[in-house]
Amino acid sequence: MNNLRSFYERHPYLAMWIALALGMVIILIWSAWSVGFTALQWLALIVITILLAGACVWIISWEDGPDAEEEAAPPTQADQP
């Protein structure tokens, strides 16, 4: 458990991507199991789902950019007129 925690602390976005992709792939397989996809179609769906999870984490990370730090910081005397 400590290994997972240290990995998350070192690579939070990668850990979120792995967790989200795993959950999304499980839901995909569970919901589309009886559809009758070929192996190539399953591979394409799983790859696209993993990339979609990465895009979701990337979009979520936009909020942690430099603008978020400026908004969270209280104004200093140098910032005030």
Image (spheres, rainbow, N blue to C red):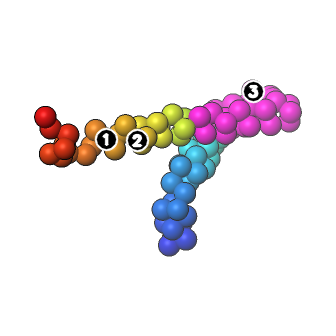
- The reply to whether residue 48 is visible in this rendering is yes
Whole-percent x, y for residue 7 in the image: 55, 64
Q: Which mark is residue 66?
A: 2
User: Was residue 37 drawn as part of the magenta stretch in this picture?
Assistant: yes
Pick whichever, 26 or 79, lies toward us. Answer: 79
Query: What is the quadrant of residue 51 in the picture?
Result: top right
The residue under label 1 is which amino acid type? Answer: Glu
Q: Which residues are magenta?
A: 28-55
Check contact, mark 2 vs mark 1: CB within 8 A. Answer: yes
Mark 1–mark 3 distance (CA, rounded to whole Å): 49 Å
Pick whichever, 53 or 65, lies toward us. Answer: 65
Q: Residue at x 34, y 44 (%)?
A: 69
Instruction: Count all numbered tags in the image, as a single digit.
Output: 3
Pick whichever, 42 or 55, lies toward us. Answer: 55
Check contact, mark 3 vs mark 2: CB within 8 A. Answer: no
Q: Residue at x 86, y 33 (%)?
A: 40
Mark 3–mark 2 distance (CA, rounded to whole Å): 45 Å
Disc 1 on helix, strand or loop?
Answer: helix
Q: Which mark is residue 70?
A: 1
- The reply to whether residue 19 is visible in this rendering is no
Q: Residues within 10 Å of mark 2 (few under 14, many from 20)?
A: few
Q: Which residue is mark 3?
A: 35
The residue under label 3 is which amino acid type? Answer: Val
Mark 2–mark 1 distance (CA, rounded to whole Å): 6 Å
Q: Residue at x 58, y 46 (%)?
A: 17
